[in-house]
Image (tube, helix red, strand yellow):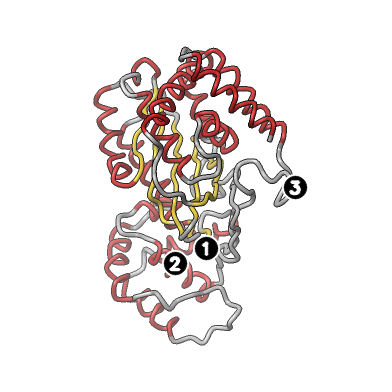
Amino acid sequence: MRQTGIANLPLHGGKAPAWLFQRMVRLGREIVRLIVEDQGPGELLVRISDPYWFQSLGCVLGFDWHSSGVTTTVCGALKEGLRGMERELGLVIAGGKGATSRKTPGEIVAAGERYSLARDSNELVHLSRLTAKIDNNALQDGFQLYHHNFFFTFDGAWAVVQQGMSERFARRYHWHSGAAESLTVDPHAAICTSVKKDSVLNLVAGESVPAQNVMTELSHEGPEKIVREIKQMKTLNLPAHHQVAVADLRPESIEKILLKTYEGQAENFEALLGMPGVGAKTLRALALISEITYGTAASWKDPAKFSFAHGGKDGHPYPVNRKVYDDSIETLRKIVERAKIERTEKENALKRVRMLWAE
């Protein structure tokens, strides 16, 4: 599997007006239908996991290009547009924003009962939960997930678009199933953000693999030994430049989780991540013991690389990738021209495409 993008977007209040959302649903349905007709449902997953294409799609559908709402509204419009067409398209969209995101497992299982899927629905539920857990806990960037959509085809391909919140900004995470053997080693192919942080605990970075191995081994130890080490760490006088922060660790509460990890005997780091109750603080405690006691430090580099989806026209923080951007827009232009929607809606959509090129 590969993760194909993260975007930081300013939070905007309110919601899309009904008249706009209804049109987004109709146009979104036509765009999806034509992509599936031409190249199959798997192609939509490739495109939806590409932050360039996703951002362009939001513009063409008529939503604000840089608002956090582009994520929730575009995904919501696609889900509503595809409702009742799942069997015809061979494609299902589960989840959504807030409380709806917590219904994702049930929606996946229901689809497994209704349709003939190449993958067991329980496996898809595991992938949905694990991608959310990685972005919430294994990548500790300070963004708390509140939106999660799980896209999957009948033949087993899947993608995830999820978003986290931190103060005035939202960060979007794109996932797409691919050829990678592991979800826990450098799953990011492109990360887009306007806020690159100085210190982010990234337990799924390639340089964190030694720490992953030690953390997994530590989870096999009796909880009393690890709790003892945590208590000892809290009394250490660490140099100011050190990345370790132990002030918020509570050995007493972590001990209950460590008992579960000890009984579970995880085979690898992915299995450890998937254990119920293993959250950010438990992982951080194991990472700190791994670093201080065994010398295997995890990565503290923010994996974010790009600003928004298309870079900056002034070349900062990086030049716009014009070819990729233009390809995204051209694809959408052709699709909109073929879409079976009212003439006025089509003209407005094409006008937005032309405005994108003008930018």
Q: Foreground residue, 165 or 313?
A: 313
For the residues bearing labels 2 and 1, Cβ distance under 8 angstroms: yes
Q: CA distance from mark 2 to mark 1?
A: 8 Å
The reply to whether discs 3 and 1 touch (Cβ–Cβ < 8 Å) is no
Q: Disc 2 on helix, strand or loop?
A: helix
Dots 3, 2 in contact, CB < 8 A: no
> Residue 355's quadrant in the figure?
top right
Which label sits in the foreground, 3 or 1? 3
Q: Position of residue 263 (x, y in %)?
A: 28, 61
**In the figure, is residue 89 to the left or right of 301?**
left
* x and y percentages locating residue 82 in the rendered image: 37, 23
Residue marked by disc 3: 314
Pick whichever, 71 or 295, lies toward us: 71
Q: What's the residue at 44%, 87% (across, down)?
A: 235
Q: Distance from label 3 to label 1 (Cα)?
A: 31 Å
- Measuring from the top left, give residue 2's x and y in whole percent: 53, 40
Looking at the rendered structure, the kind of residue marked 2 is: Arg
- Real-space CA distance between mark 3 and mark 2, rounded to the nearest whole angstrom: 39 Å
Residue occupying image coordinates x 37% and y 55%: 266
First-in-chain label (3 vs 1): 1
Answer left or right for 278 relative to 11: left
Up-down relation of residue 209 to residue 147 (above or below): below
- Residue for badge 2: 284
Quadrant hosting residue 54: top right
Instruction: Name the residue tied to disc 1.
Output: 201
Helix, strand or loop at label 1? It is strand
Q: Earlier in the sequence, mark 2 or mark 1?
A: 1
Element type at marker 3? loop
Q: Amino acid at mark 1?
A: Leu
- Identified by mark 3, the residue type is Asp
Q: Residues within 10 Å of mark 1 (few under 14, many from 20)?
A: many
What's the residue at 58%, 82% (across, down)?
240
